[in-house]
Image: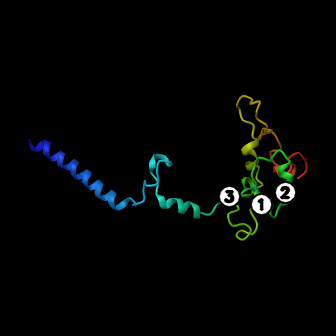
Amino acid sequence: MKNHVLRPLWCVLAAIALTLIVRHFMVPADFGVNGESFTYSYHRLSNVDEWRDFKAKYKGREYCQECHEENVAETSSSKHQLIQCENCHGPAIDHPDDPETLAIDTSRELCLRCHASLPYPDNPRSRIKAIDPNRHNTDTACIECHNPHNPNLEEG
């Protein structure tokens, strides 16, 4: 064969060989051995233990209930019953040790994430009361009039 055909062929074969050698040293031995239950079998067996040992960032309402029974009970019987405590209070990853108290987001923007009136057609299944943020008490924080644990009340 001519050189103009052989030279590129050798380059391609060298690139394939280099890729296989690098792959041999870079890919862990337990990669892809965990069976078909994982997407495309691309999974490290040791990854299961890593995720099992990973500290959960969000604890859930049950964790909050141990110390805040009255707030959880009040929220559970309100229109905010589907919202987890940490959506407003932040993650309780090491609470109450560090931080001792969670920073509470009382900003108007947090409430508007769910309660801003959007220009979409009415959805009869939606149960969220929407407001026009440009017209409804623009200079006032929502918690000055509404109790987020019990939004049925008109006092914070």
| Above or below, 142 relative to 44 | above
Figure quadrant of residue 61: bottom right
**Which amino acid is tagged 1?**
Cys
Instruction: Give percent across and percent down for residue 92.
Output: 71, 62
State if disc 2 and disc 1 touch (CB < 8 Å): yes
Q: What's the residue at 47%, 47% (across, down)?
A: 36
Of the pair 125 and 27, the residue shown nearer to us: 27
Residue 58: assigned label? 3
* Separation of residues labelled 1 and 2 (CA atoms): 9 Å
The residue labelled by disc 1 is: 64
Residue 71: assigned label? 2
Q: What's the residue at 90%, 47% (across, down)?
A: 154
Tell me which label, 1 or 3, sits earlier in the chain. Answer: 3
State if disc 2 and disc 3 touch (CB < 8 Å): no
Tell me which label, 1 or 2, sits earlier in the chain. Answer: 1
Instruction: Give percent across and percent down for residue 101.
Output: 76, 66
Instruction: Give percent across and percent down for residue 31.
Output: 42, 56
